[in-house]
Amino acid sequence: MEIADLLKLQTQVLWAAFAVATAFGFIAQRTHFCTMGAISDIVNMGDWTRMRMWGMAVGVAMVGFYAMAWLGWIDPGKAIYTTGRIVWLSALVGGSLFGFGMVLASGCGSKTLVRIGAGSLKSLVVFFVMGLAAFATLRGVFGVLRVNTVDTVAFDVAAGGAIPAWIASGFGSNPALTGLVMAVLVGGGLVVWALMGPEFRSINNVVGGLGIGLVIVLMWWVSGRLGFVPEHPETLDAVYLGSNTGRMESLTFTAPMAYTLDWLIFFSDKSKVLTFGVVTVAGVVVGALVCALIEGSFRWEGFRSTQDTALHIAGAALMGVGGVTALGCTVGQGLSGLSTLSFVSVVAVTGIVLGAIASLRFQMWLLDRE
């Protein structure tokens, strides 16, 4: 492959990623897909409908990911969530910070982008604060603190970070087949569980769960199949085109917000090029905007009070720090990470849920004081 062909393929990968992210934004806006909302519905009302939608999305993504791995289209070990370094404390602490912050900020990173597309100016503030905090945790002062504290508490697994790889290594079974069987059992079980709820079985809910799950699968295909080059013409190394991490990627939004700010601020710097993360951030906003305009739900929205402003800013900062520390957000570790059956993703999602519950209790305490 010549350099010109490589650049052409990279452009195709970025356009494909933008298109899939646009679909995510459209579906999320149309179906009100929201992880924070799902947890809030359970805690405050005992309603599991949106959690069933989330569970279906994870199940579909899980089966799709390992079906592609079984077909040989992608390599599960090349995802950032399946590396052999198990940073469990970073995942737990970062996830908890993110979960607490997303409740204060009225939604996670993906919901923030969707709300921007629907006209929320306060979500635009959340975006800038979250992106700045994420950048500081990637390369700045919080990054130094992260590397020297929670990141040091980890262990290494030769088989990688995916649970099916552990099982295959322990029993000497075929990794691809083991992954597919486990994905069908766990992911299929989640889909069945979702459909068992009578209140869930509406077109809107099923489209939300199925659509978001397929979007995650498509993004893995774009990055891991379409964008994979076995041998770069200059370095002779295998590369994933457009990747910020150098590995196979699907949707995630915390670090990409930082990359987006970096690209916007240093646009004239020729070394700052469009990447997978940047185009997906833009795609979600565009998709939500199109949906909001079509359904007539676009509304300008601002902060209600000084306290509302302070809580959103604090929540955004916690999400930026926590999302990078945990190696992903509710979409990154939640949907994309869990689709790989990564142990670290399970820990991170546990932290996110616990943090969100604690934050919901905190908000109730604030309301009681008023």
Image (tube, helix red, strand yellow):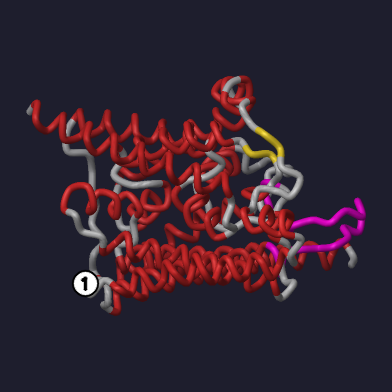
**Along the horizontal axis of the image, is 12 left or right of 212?**
right
Residue at 23 percent across and 43 percent down: it is 302
Quadrant holding the N terminus: bottom right
Q: Label 1: which residue?
A: 199
Residue 215 visible in the shown view: no
Magenta-highlighted stretch: main secondary structure? loop
**Along the horizontal axis of the image, is 135 left or right of 369?**
right
- Name above or below for residue 176 compared with residue 369: below
Name the spot of residue 121 as percent of width and height, x first.
30, 45
Tell me if residue 340 is in the magenta stretch.
no
- Extreme residue toward the front, this view: 171
**Along the horizontal axis of the image, is 260 left or right of 111?**
right
**Along the horizontal axis of the image, is 127 left or right of 77?**
left
Residue at 65 percent across and 48 percent down: it is 161
Name the spot of residue 200 as percent of width and height, x first.
26, 71
Magenta range: 224-245
Residue at 55 percent across and 28 percent down: it is 136
